[in-house]
Amino acid sequence: MAPQDTDANAVLFEDDAETEDVGLAKMPVQQAGAQKWETNYEWHIIVFLPLVYTAGLYGGYLFLVSATWQTKIFTIFLYVTSIISITAGAHRLWSHKAYKAKWPLQLILMFFHTSALQYSVINWVRDHRMHHKYVDTDADPHNATRGLFFSHVGWVMMGKHPEFERKSKGLDLSDVESNSILRFQQKYYVILVTIICFILPTVIPVYLWNETWMNAILVPGLFHRVCVYNAVGLVNSVLHKWGYKPYDKNMAATQISLVNYVLFGENAHNYHHAFPWDYRTSELSASTTFSLTTAFINLFARIGWAYDLKTISDDIIRKRVMRTGDGSHQIWGWGDKDQCKEEMNAAEIIYPKHD
């Protein structure tokens, strides 16, 4: 099915057009440092996560020196499917509703999302929608203004900020909470994680190609997972600190081509924050990078399992680049700062700011 072009003034999420709950959720969000609060540390994660990272790093060493070739391929497969389940599933499908999927594809994405150990999809969607709605404020769960370490991994070691708890009460999650596949995952998450994350990745290499128990536990079990943690963390940390801003220089979100190699199409973060409803999350018509996630969605669109794909027209993109970009766009930037400044000043007259 052909992608659908969306209007430039479309809301971030379809439920954003609705009014938040009255009361505390309507109060303005507090900025970092605006008030004192007692930080609640998640001590079980603080203790557990360094152990997982240490074992995972050793698993990386075993991946190189002693794992069988079957285990190496299996580990790469788990990494790819975990990333795809997050980018194509939890992110583009369920968080932003950038396309629709029939139940077989939803089931596949839910299964591999469980393998990624990124909490349930419903919890992931809640955090990501809060990130977009209150980006880089204290209501953002991985607020980048609190530092690179916090936005990369530290935020999972702490309880949610009071501003997140307050503002999230007005967030509409009825679409994901009414999804039977996601409700099933939420209800039986611990059981599913035990089977999919820990038992299957261990017993499959041992019983199918005689891998050692040590390699099976540490390589596909933990090394793959640590790689996924850090790949996803790059979006929250690095892509909110360094890089270019060809679509909106006023946003913290950036883009770096190098990140695309580990995230399969999620490196164009400045584009994504400018046009979050585009199922591609990047301007592929002008991009020189290949998005495996977008190719994955396109593949299932061909067989009818993915449909109603939303995209942005080149004209809308060009207007946004000319009006708010930093001049680094590969087509409308030309790499000449003086020329870009003249073009953007002209664009202010033709396309006045209305954000």
Image (cartoon, helix red, strand yellow):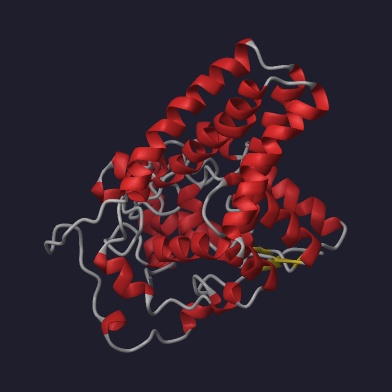
- Which one is nearer the viewer's eye here, 314 or 9? 9
| Quadrant assignment for the N terminus | bottom right
Residue 329 in the image: x percent, y percent?
49, 44
Q: Name which quarter of the figure residue 101 lies in.
A: bottom right
Using the rendered image of the protein, determine whether residue 318 is visible from the camera's viewpoint.
yes
Q: Residue at x 79, y 29 (%)?
A: 207
Q: Residue furthest right?
A: 303
| Quadrant assignment for the C terminus | bottom left
77 over 276 or under it: above or below: above
Q: Residue at x 53, y 70 (%)?
A: 8
Q: Name which quarter of the figure residue 89 lies in.
A: bottom right
Residue 174 in the image: x percent, y percent?
55, 79
Q: Is residue 157 left or right of residue 270?
A: left
354 over 108 or under it: above or below: below
Q: Residue at x 48, y 83 (%)?
A: 17
Residue 108 in the image: x percent, y percent?
74, 54
Q: Is residue 114 left or right of residue 16?
A: right
- Which one is nearer the viewer's eye here, 328 or 176? 176
Q: How many numbered marks have been drawn onto this rendered protein structure?
A: 0
Q: Name which quarter of the figure residue 175 lies in.
A: bottom right
Using the rendered image of the protein, determine whether residue 314 is visible from the camera's viewpoint.
no
Q: Residue furthest bottom?
A: 22
Q: Is residue 315 left or right of residue 297?
A: left
- Which one is nearer the viewer's eye here, 196 or 256? 196
Q: Residue at x 52, y 31 (%)?
A: 258
303 over 256 or under it: above or below: below
- Which one is nearer the viewer's eye here, 298 or 179? 179
